[in-house]
Amino acid sequence: MHLGGKTHRVKADVAIIGGGTAGLNTAMAAAECGASVLIVDKAHIQRSGAIAGGIDHFMAFMETGESWDTREAYLAYVGKVARGAANLRIHEKVLCDELPAAMARIEKMGISLRQEDGSYLRTQALGQPGPYSINFNGQRLKPAMALEVKRRKCRVLNRVQVTKLCLHEGEMAGFCGYDMRNGDFYEIQAKATVIATGNTNRMFKSQTGNPFNLWYCPANTGDLHRAAFDAGVELANVEYVRMTIVPKGFSAPGFNAFFGMGGKLVNGLGVPFMTDYHPQGDAAPRNVMVWAALTETKAGRGPIYVDVRHLSASDLAHLFSTLGIDKDTLPEFLMAKGYAREGAMIELTVSEPMQARPSEQCGSGIKIDEACASNVPGLFAAGDASDQMGCLHMCVAGGFYAGKQAAKYARARNRLLPLKAKELRQERLRVFAPMQRQNGLAPGEFENVVRIITTDHFGPIKNETSLKAGIAKLDALNSYRDELAAGDLHTLMRCHEAVNIHAVAKIVAETSLARTESRFSPYHHRSDFPESSDDWCGLVVARREGDNGVATRFETLLYDA
Ligand SMILES: Cc1cc2nc3c(=O)[nH]c(=O)nc-3n(C[C@H](O)[C@H](O)[C@H](O)COP(=O)(O)OP(=O)(O)OC[C@H]3O[C@@H](n4cnc5c(N)ncnc54)[C@H](O)[C@@H]3O)c2cc1C
């Protein structure tokens, strides 16, 4: 029987939940503004989150004199590829104003965005009008950021899973969580709190059958999307179900590397097909590539491959020597499968879906304004966890911007708000309840059922009937949440993750139901409303209603063209 260990009470001006790319940049900024900073992460910040294993592309406009390489051209691109999901006013603040400083900060940390000869290698993909993606070696970027927040004297709590946000008279007062190694309970008070916990994974069946073998970080399970939603925080862009194209049998990225270097998607007949789907062919936006791959396969022309045989010897050498930057073992895997370094048709497949942004130029999750603030005073969001940031460029630049805003808020508030003792007691009981049960449901079993429901009903194609039936099935699982059992603290974490994945899945389904059009197909493809409509150019905003309800409203987004 475990009711948790010691209680620790910690105070900070700015507390950041999630020490991934965005969270660490938030911390750097808040510390630079003079705030006392606390970072709380479920893993270890040295190697946690999406870029734990490394990263290889940084998107930027660089004002080189080319017409596509200006701030204005970049914003026009964002307005085109993320239309209806990206708020350009916020984009200007979190990316454009911060970009040069963000790139300089990375270099100052000892990670070069350049090639050995000092030049930038820029490639074009994802619907870009010019080569915006800087190819670099970011294998050591995460440890470098972790070192930098230590240097700036930020306090860090590793391996603490945050489970609840605490409000005082409608304002953010703090949050609590537990240490996954010793069961100690943490009660944290902060003048400003920033959520930077990434997106929600493990929500759909994976291509390999192993729920942890995913494109994105399997430890990001929507914990704070659920906790924030329960606390009355608004979410946006959550109806989108993001996917990519990955090597068959190895859920790794490689999309940007393959297609940025000039790889071609070909079908099982050996025929390139992307120009049939988009004027930019293999440089089309990611959702179009996924849609085309699904369509070719459905038409019986699968499997799909990336053909790199036409690349020059030096481009091929570069491709194969850098493919392992964000997933160490990918080159080895490809070699073991028998693909020759001289170039090959590498079999690809469509990845598992996940709750995440519909474009590289926005996010999906906590709805933020131009100061990265949510609708709850004192609560901010950054990175993939927010509805307006995602990808490396925005998480570094926008994370830093969010830290400045949170520090400013903390300075103005200038006092800590109290946490309620009764609420904390109740949360401690809830958190450790699975450890009181001798016999119960294993979290993996519960999670598997959630994945079957989501995949069958909205993974990714959906319609009113499939969504309503899916929601009814997810609701029917509610009572089983109280039967989850854990014999150790690691399984306890899995219990909470399973409950959070289930909760976010329901919000995804409800918001999908609200948007009666299709946008970024297949990320939101309604077979009963297969076309996009200008009436839906904006955000579906979700908020908790009653005990188990999801209320939605629509907020229009305006674009010049
Ligand atoms: C393999 C891979 C390759 C990629 N390649 C590129 C690329 O080349 N270019 C590009 O622009 N983008 C790329 N991306 C996307 C980019 O890496 C992400 O958008 C970005 O790093 C997300 O940063 P984040 O801080 O929002 O989330 P993350 O870095 O994922 O951080 C989330 C953090 O929250 C913590 N956390 C989660 N739940 C809790 C909880 N309950 N309590 C406490 N802590 C919690 C996690 O442990 C984690 O540290 C890639 C992504 C992946 C997965």
Image (cartoon, grey):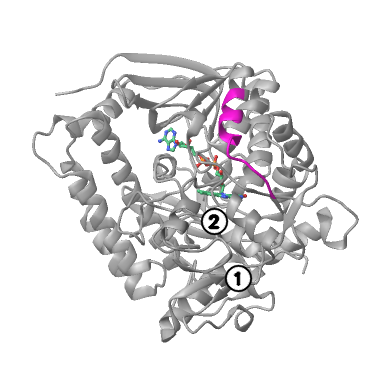
Q: Amino acid at mark 2?
A: Arg
SS for dot 2:
loop
- 40 to 243, vertically: above or below: above
- Would you call the spot at circle 2 few (<14 residues within 10 Å), some (14-19), or many (20 or more)? many
Q: Amino acid at mark 1?
A: Arg
Residue 262: name its quadrant. bottom right
Q: Nearer the viewer, residue 545 or 191?
A: 191
The circle on residue 357 is 2
The spot of residue 165 in percent (x, y) is: 42, 32
- 213 to 461, vertically: above or below: above
Q: Report which residue position mark 1 lands on.
A: 309
**Stretch in magenta:** 135-147
The spot of residue 552 in percent (x, y) is: 47, 58
Residue 251: name its quadrant. bottom left
SS for dot 1:
loop
259 to the left or right of 327 = right
60 to the left or right of 499 = right
CA–CA distance between discs 2 and 1? 32 Å
At x 75%, y 48%, the residue is 92
Q: Nearer the viewer, residue 520 or 272?
A: 272
Residue 140 within the magenta-colored segment of the rendering: yes
- Would you call the spot at circle 1 few (<14 residues within 10 Å), some (14-19), or many (20 or more)? some
Quadrant where the image shows the N terminus: top left
560 to the left or right of 285 = right
- 108 to 451, vertically: above or below: above
At x 31%, y 51%, the residue is 502
The spot of residue 309 in percent (x, y) is: 60, 70
